[in-house]
Amino acid sequence: MCSITALIHAACIRSGVSHHKHQDRVRKLDRGVTCQTTLRRRPGRGDGSVRAPWDLPRVAVSVRAAETVGAASRGYDAGKNVQGRKRHVIVDCLGLLLVVLVTAASVQDRDGARPALERLHDWYEKIILIWADGGYAGKLVTWAKQKLQLTLEIVKRSDNTKGFVVLPRRWVVERSLSWIFQCRRCVRDYERLSEHHEAMVLWSMIVLMGRRLARSTSRKSP
């Protein structure tokens, strides 16, 4: 199953699209181009080599919630001073979304990471390495190695560094978050259920990937 097909499959389930409409959309995609091959077989460096897309950055970001968000699924992130929900996002090395999990903003990054990593392990068995920031250090690294056979590598900021510094691999997921925020529906959380907000994030990435496929197809056409 290609990346866009997998995202649409997850988005349809979360947004309540009927089974027949969902199957029709999946069949149309399967008859089209192979999305994963088209988007990921692109040179990553000037020497023509391609980086394996299974080295994954992950991060969590809190989003302000509207009045329509239920009180049971929202919380307060004291570190970011945000009242709302938190997106736990995992992307590949190209910045394309693989997993998104929405929880209350009061949920710690490490606690939200466990179900997100379990979902990643179920969907993408070949993945073995994940980059994360210092908020995921500690017992989560050992748990991921023992339970899921995943290597969680922490990208830390140097204690001697002052000011803004671009951390290795961290910029990839930060760029992906900016792509998601370009979708008006994802600037804030307006959804009653967390699953619906996950669907909105998936749809925003589907739009981005579809545009990239359209550009790559038009370039090849005479």
Image: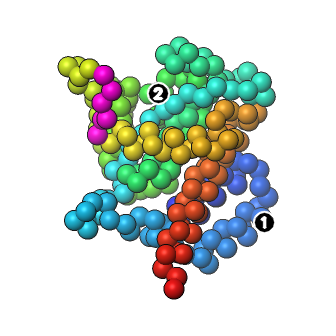
Which picture quadrant has residue 175? top left
- The amino acid sitting under disc 1 is His
Residue for badge 1: 20
Chief secondary structure of the magenta span?
loop
Which numbered circle lies on residue 203? none
User: Helix or strand or loop: what does disc 1 sit on?
Assistant: helix
Looking at the image, residue 82 sits to the left or right of residue 68; the answer is left
Q: Which residues are magenta?
A: 163-168
Is there a contact, CB below 8 Å, between mark 2 and mark 1? no
Q: Residue at x 30, y 22 (%)?
A: 163
Residue for badge 2: 109
Residue 109 belongs to magenta span: no
Q: Residues within 10 Å of mark 2 (few under 14, many from 20)?
A: some
Q: Is residue 109 above or below residue 3?
A: above
Which picture quadrant has residue 21? bottom right
Which picture quadrant has residue 24? bottom right
Q: Is residue 154 visible?
A: no
Decide which of 218, 137 is in the foreground and name it: 218
- The amino acid sitting under disc 2 is Asp
Looking at the image, residue 221 sits to the left or right of residue 45; the answer is right
Q: Residue at x 73, y 26 (%)?
A: 66
Q: Residue furthest front?
A: 222
Q: Residue at x 67, y 73 (%)?
A: 28
